[in-house]
Amino acid sequence: MGRGFPNRFSTQYRCYSVSMLAGPNDRSDVEKGGKIIMPPSALDQLSRLNITYPMLFKLTNKNSDRMTHCGVLEFVADEGICYLPHWMMQNLLLEEGGLVQVESVNLMVATYSKFQPQSPDFLDITNPKAVLENALRNFACLTTGDVIAINYNEKIYELRVMETKPDKAVSIIECDMNVDFDAPLGYKEPERRSQNQDEPTEEEPDPSSYADMDLGFRAFTGSGNRLDGKTKGIEPNPVPLAASDIKRGIPNYDFKVGKITFIRNSRPQPRRVIDDVSS
């Protein structure tokens, strides 16, 4: 009598995507996780084999030598058929109606996993770690190298499983797992300029450039008219102002909103007291 595996479930099914599942009920929830739908005969066989819970399975496409792991959601498929999420069929390189080998397995409980978003759009999510942890509740296990798909705000985000511990395939049911992220695929770090370039040094201005500045009020620079109507001697002849004599204003660093300060150019002269000299 040859050696057998009395507690091992192993069979082949033709697999289809969930959209091919017949029935009035919408089963889009299957696409949001990592579980499959199997026929009722599988449940009967698994019960007789005393398979340990949770029921976890290894899926293998022998034509492409691709494999992944999954859980089971329901046993309502037609005999000889199983329904898989679309992302799982892509990982296995399976087409509609292709053959997949389904085997029962026992996996170690996960303690750590690292993911790489396949698009920088994943960074637009306010709290990506919380979103991922919530989405993983619909998964039963993870396999290193898989590209899983999660649905958030009616948008599909793909993430590659870069690493899992303590094994390359782990169970994530009722576990305390640390989650980490790699930089998204195609992400580029923003260019950072050096501090010297960001803060240009202040250079002493050239006094000759002050000639183009608005000089403000200058006394006796206007024109006038003589009472006798003559124009001789009424042309303005202002004193030329050297550029070196122009002084730049100093800002008032103690300025406060609502307070007006009047600055005098000359100091007030002290009052002169004239004592009457008695004759």
Image (cartoon, grey):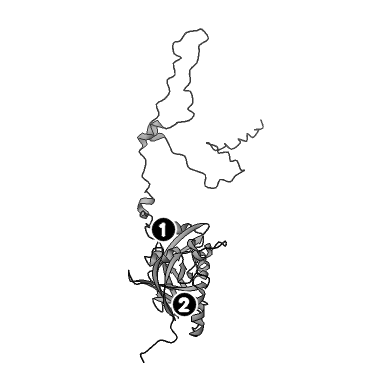
**Residue at 49%, 61% in the rendered image:** 19
Circles 2 and 1, Cβ within 8 Å, touching? The answer is no
**Residue at 40%, 78% in the rendered image:** 167
Residue 254 point in image, percent of width and height: 55, 47
Q: How far, Cα to Cα, is label 2 from label 1?
A: 30 Å
Q: Quadrant of the N terminus?
A: bottom left
Left or right of residue 278, residue 143 in this image: left
Along the viewing direction, whichever of 49 and 106 lies nearer the viewer:
49
Rendered image quadrant of residue 12: bottom left
**Residue at 44%, 16% in the rendered image:** 235
Q: In the displayed orientation, state which residue is furthest to the left.
A: 64
Left or right of residue 263, residue 199 in this image: left
Residue 25 point in image, percent of width and height: 57, 62
Q: Is residue 128 above or below residue 213?
A: below
Q: Quadrant of the C terminus?
A: top right
Along the viewing direction, whichever of 6 and 85 lies nearer the viewer:
6
Q: Secondary structure at mark 2?
A: strand
Task: Tell which tag, 2 or 1, sits nearer the viewer.
Answer: 2
Q: Which residue is mark 2?
A: 56
Q: Which residue is mark 1?
A: 119
Lower sequence index among marks 2 and 1:
2
At label 2, which amino acid type do we have? Leu
Along the viewing direction, whichever of 115 and 256 lies nearer the viewer:
115
Evaluate whether residue 140 shows in this view: no
Residue 189 point in image, percent of width and height: 38, 57
Marker count (numbered): 2
At label 1, which amino acid type do we have? Ser
